[in-house]
Image (tube, rainbow, N blue to C red):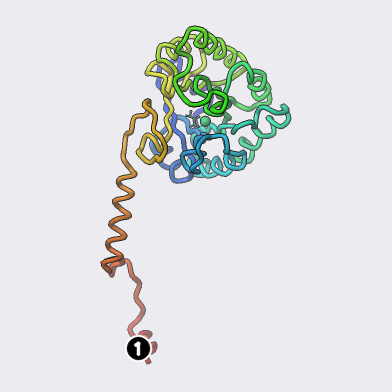
């Protein structure tokens, strides 16, 4: 299994890091087969598999439940689990206990937390306690209520300068990598060059050390808004609907199940049944 050290080495060697979200057992099996470097049990699961409007309603219990399933499907892959909304902003004891549950009870290898300055100390405390932390800057969806919506972040000088500064603070606090979401590619390139830890981009251009996408978006299995920065590599939704329609039509027409799908009993048993 890859480790935080492997990701550092990949950055140094210029080998791109591949990450994708996974929320359940079959997805995890598929992702491990496809040799993803890391899996993210993202709180995007709130929208993607639970049908919520945002990541705000997602709970610790949700993250634990889904992380356990992913761990069973991908036992040899480094798993990062998002700490959900407001589970790392209360007391440090509460934060540490939440992180402990994700690593110890659920099988995550690391946690991801959103934000800059305001959580630097938290990142330090978690790292000190032995919890590998991935940062997340730029568009931070848990702030949707405060931001008033989603969109490209840090386009202006002041905001961009602050993001660079915050990325350096996160590195200093011990973060082993950061996600940069929905920022101009030029800014992502600067951050990637300034940091010695890997920068994993989503909607952040092609100059970062790696990429992450939401699984359902990239394989065409999503039913929520798909952002501009997503590339759809497959269309599994169409394949699934097609399969279901064929099943429905064959059952309605009495064509399924066929002989080969059916079980038989011995002729003499049958005779005695008919009496
Ligand atoms: O929850 C998620 O899927 C994420 C990625 C978009 C980075 O945080
Ligand atoms: Na997330």
Q: Quadrant of residue 20?
A: top left
Q: Nearer the viewer, residue 66 or 223?
A: 223
Which quadrant of the figure contains the C terminus? bottom left
Q: Nearer the viewer, residue 122 or 225?
A: 225
Other-residue count near label 1 (Cα within 10 Å), few / some / many at <14 / 14–19 / ≥20: few
Q: Quadrant of residue 227?
A: top left
In the depicted structure, whether residue 29 falls above or below residue 93: below
Q: Position of residue 34 (x, y in %)?
A: 38, 36
* Residue drawn at (54%, 23%) of the image: 147
Residue at the disc numbered 1 = 271
Q: Position of residue 179 (x, y in %)?
A: 49, 22
Q: Position of residue 121 (x, y in %)?
A: 67, 19
Q: Position of residue 141 (x, y in %)?
A: 52, 28
Q: Nearer the viewer, residue 104 or 58?
A: 58
In the depicted structure, whether residue 39 falls above or below residue 156: below
Q: Secondary structure at mark 1?
A: helix
In the depicted structure, whether residue 65 falls above or below residue 43: below
* Residue drawn at (61%, 35%) of the image: 103
Count of all numbered marks drawn on residues in the image: 1
**In the shown orientation, is residue 18 left or right of residue 45?**
left
* Residue drawn at (46%, 34%) of the image: 21
**In the shown orientation, is residue 214 left or right of residue 125?**
left
Direction front: furthest residue: 148
Q: Nearer the viewer, residue 138 or 3?
A: 138
* Residue drawn at (48%, 33%) of the image: 39
């Amino acid at each position: 299994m890859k480790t935080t050290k492997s990701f550092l080495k990949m950055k140094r060697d210029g080998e791109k890091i591949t990450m994708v979200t996974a929320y359940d057992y079959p997805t995890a099996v598929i992702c491990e087969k496809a040799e993803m470097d890391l899996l993210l049990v993202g709180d995007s699961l709130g929208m993607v598999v639970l049908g919520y409007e945002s990541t705000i309603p997602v709970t610790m219990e949700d993250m634990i439940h889904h992380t356990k399933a992913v761990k069973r499907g991908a036992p040899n892959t480094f798993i990062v689990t998002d700490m959900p909304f407001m589970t790392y902003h209360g007391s440090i004891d509460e934060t540490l206990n939440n992180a402990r549950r994700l690593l110890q009870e659920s099988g995550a290898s690391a946690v991801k937390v959103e934000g800059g300055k305001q959580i630097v100390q938290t990142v330090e405390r978690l790292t000190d306690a032995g919890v590998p932390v991935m940062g997340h800057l730029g568009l931070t969806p848990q702030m949707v209520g405060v931001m008033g919506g989603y969109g490209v972040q840090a386009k202006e000088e002041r905001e961009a300068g602050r993001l660079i500064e915050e990325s350096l603070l996160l590195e200093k606090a011990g973060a082993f990598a950061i996600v940069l979401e929905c920022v101009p590619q030029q800014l992502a390139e600067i951050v990637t060059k300034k940091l010695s830890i890997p920068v994993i981009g989503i909607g952040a251009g092609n100059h970062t050390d790696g990429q992450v996408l939401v699984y359902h978006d990239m394989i065409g299995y999503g039913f929520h808004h798909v952002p501009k920065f997503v590339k759809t590599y497959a269309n599994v939704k169409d394949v699934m609907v097609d399969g279901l329609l064929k099943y429905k039509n064959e059952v309605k027409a009495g064509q399924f199940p066929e002989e080969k799908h059916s079980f038989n009993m011995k002729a003499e048993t049958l005779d005695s049944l008919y009496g």
